[in-house]
Image (cartoon, grey):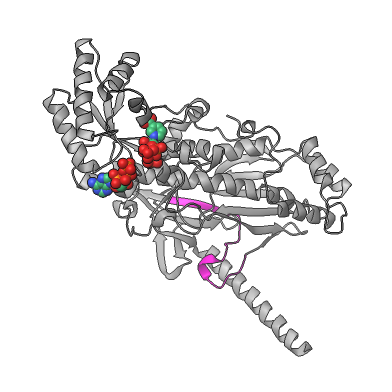
């Protein structure tokens, strides 16, 4: 599915205005082609969790592949006026945009990989104007899908192998929210969606039951079940809570027995209100006593990972979980704070000049360099991640330092197994990545999560997975911070002297 084909026109304007005004300013200052490196990363796991599952790269790739300004885009930009009613964008700049084709080098961490704060999920190297234009769409796409894939992975962990169906379309944040949430939820481990367009676009299995309206449109609940089963004798899941749940279960059982006489089996029942622990146990007992142990019990009603965990602890007999609002809106944390920061600029002598954005908090200061993430593993799973600069290759043992707490250090021996996570996606603007299909991405996500120690996977107060800056990079970063702060001090003095 092409990301842009969901919309009528090109998506080059799917960006913030300041990217275009900066683009014109770079162009006007003869800086448009200056080579830059930006990294896209987040600073804190969503949901106070211990891990994040990255997603959205396929849509980002589609976006970049199709990036170009259409005649209509250029006409729109040409129509914009500044505060003095002057044209905002110059004609020659608009011609430059119209002729623009991307030439960037892009590396990214494959979808379905578990990732940690401050690790670049994507690195882009190329003309600064191009890198800048891609900032907003890349953040939009990767932030949301990563957030939802992570929520889905937490739900999948809590469900301990039970099937989960995504029911959230009606509560999603708009049309694209519903579609991209369905995709990301599948990556995170959800088995199926009720969203038919997502099913068609992404080839995700589609599943559904029926609504209360079906039952309410018949004088008798049992007649409603029987009528539904007459149309879907092999595919019926009855919603039993319209009037009285346990009475509803008994009527479902009566219809299931009629189906059996005709040689078919009821698939399941759905509980959508009340005490789901008590009702599922009672429903299971009634179904088992009626000789229907294979009729499954699906539960829905404002569920999330904490309720799944609690219901399991209460001994609920639920086989399938229908999850809507809390999943597709990432209800308890509606945004991932991913950022996109300049990390290096090529000087006229061909050397890189490292760049960083200062902050009062050390942990918020961006990391300069041309960064790569190296993941060390042993037979037990993932051990630690090292962020290093490709300008300073690693040979032999390496020490990582946690920039949030510089006393936290770990030495990784040269004999450990490791993998570099960022892989080539575009070279000179051309796609070079062989994209896995969605089921393969889902499998990767599950395998990745299971490589984490259970103390990192738990929902509440998880342990921190070790991630650090490689020592040379850490020292370089500190040197730059001190330099910038010293420069700042001198200019403050000069400013005071001037007064
Ligand atoms: N045994 C349980 N333990 C903890 N929470 C539960 C349990 N059973 C249900 N819940 C959750 O409690 C919340 C409220 O359930 P309740 O049945 O009151 O829902 P409701 O939305 O008021 O019902 P209705 O859909 O009939 O309006 C829901 O999020 C539901 O998933
Ligand atoms: O609860 P969610 O996780 O969002 O799952 C989706 C919900 O959507 C449907 O009902 P709807 O909310 O439309 O109506 P209801 O609450 O009256 O059942 C369905 O019966 C679920 O309860
Ligand atoms: O198929 C269902 O049961 C369903 C679909 C969407 C929302 N709630 C339930």
| Residue 248 horizontal/vertical position (percent) | 23, 29
Q: Is 493 rendered above or below residue 50?
A: below
Tell me the residue at 24%/36% (across/down).
318
- Depth check: 487 or 417 in front? 487
In front of the other: 218 or 246:
218
Residue occupying the far front of the picture: 219
Which quarter is ligand 3 in?
top left
Look at the image and tell me in which quarter the N terminus lies. top right
The residue shown at (82%, 40%) is: 75
Question: From which residue to which does the magenta span run?
Answer: 357-375
Say which residue appears at 72% left-offset and 55% top-offset: 18
Is 80 left, or right, of 55 in this rendering?
A: right
Is 431 drawn above or below residue 215 in the view shown?
A: below
Q: How many labels sit on residues?
A: 0
Image position of 244 (left or right of 464): left
Q: Magenta span has 377?
A: no
Q: Residue 470, percent across and down?
A: 50, 61
407 left or right, relative to 321: right
- The residue shown at (50%, 25%) is 200
Q: Quadrant of residue 97?
A: top right
Q: Position of residue 258 (x, y in %)?
A: 21, 14
């Amino acid at each position: 599915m092409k990301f842009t084909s969901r919309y009528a026109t090109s998506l080059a304007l799917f960006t913030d205005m300041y990217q275009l005004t900066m683009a014109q300013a770079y162009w006007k200052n003869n800086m448009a082609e200056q080579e830059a490196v930006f990294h896209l990363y987040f600073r804190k796991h969503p949901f106070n969790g211990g891990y994040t599952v990255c997603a959205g790269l396929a849509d980002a790739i589609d976006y970049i592949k199709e990036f170009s300004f259409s005649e209509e885009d250029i006409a729109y930009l040409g129509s914009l006026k500044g505060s003095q009613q002057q044209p905002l964008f110059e004609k020659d700049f608009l011609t430059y945009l119209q002729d623009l084709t991307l030439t960037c080098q892009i590396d990214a961490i494959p979808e379905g990989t578990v990732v940690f704060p401050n690790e670049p999920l994507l690195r882009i190297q190329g003309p600064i104007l191009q890198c800048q234009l891609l900032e907003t769409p890349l953040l939009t796409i990767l932030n949301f899908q990563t957030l939802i894939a992570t929520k889905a992975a937490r739900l999948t962990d809590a469900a301990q192998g039970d099937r989960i169906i995504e029911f959230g379309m009606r509560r999603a944040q708009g049309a694209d929210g519903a579609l991209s949430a369905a995709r990301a939820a599948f990556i995170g481990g959800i088995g199926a969606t009720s969203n038919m367009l997502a099913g068609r676009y992404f080839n995700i299995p589609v599943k559904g039951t029926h609504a209360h309206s079906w039952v309410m449109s018949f004088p008798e609940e049992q007649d409603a079940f029987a009528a539904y089963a007459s149309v879907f004798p092999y595919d019926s899941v009855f919603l039993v809570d319209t009037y009285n749940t346990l009475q509803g279960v008994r009527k479902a059982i009566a219809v299931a027995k009629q189906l059996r006489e005709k040689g078919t089996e009821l698939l399941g029942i759905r509980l959508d209100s009340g005490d789901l622990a008590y009702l599922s146990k009672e429903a299971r007992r009634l179904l088992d006593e009626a000789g229907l142990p294979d009729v499954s019990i699906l539960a829905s009603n404002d569920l999330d990972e904490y309720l799944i965990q609690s219901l399991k602890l209460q001994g609920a007999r639920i086989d399938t979980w229908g999850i809507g609002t809390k999943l597709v809106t990432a209800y308890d944390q509606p945004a991932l704070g991913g950022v996109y920061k300049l990390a290096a600029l090529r000087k006229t002598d061909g050397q890189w000049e490292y760049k960083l954005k200062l902050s009062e908090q050390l942990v918020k200061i961006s990391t300069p360099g041309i960064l790569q993430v190296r993941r060390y593993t042993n037979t037990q799973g993932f051990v630690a991640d090292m962020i290093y600069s490709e300008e300073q290759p690693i040979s032999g043992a390496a020490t990582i330092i946690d920039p949030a707490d510089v006393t936290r250090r770990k030495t990784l021996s040269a004999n450990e197994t490791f993998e570099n996570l960022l892989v080539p996606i575009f070279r000179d603007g051309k796609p070079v990545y062989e994209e896995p299909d969605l089921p393969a991405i889902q499998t990767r996500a599950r395998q990745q999560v299971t490589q984490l120690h259970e103390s990192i996977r738990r929902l509440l107060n998880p342990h921190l997975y070790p991630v650090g800056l490689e020592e040379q990079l850490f020292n370089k970063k500190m040197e730059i911070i001190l330099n910038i702060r010293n420069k700042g001090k001198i200019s403050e003095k000069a400013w005071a002297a001037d007064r």
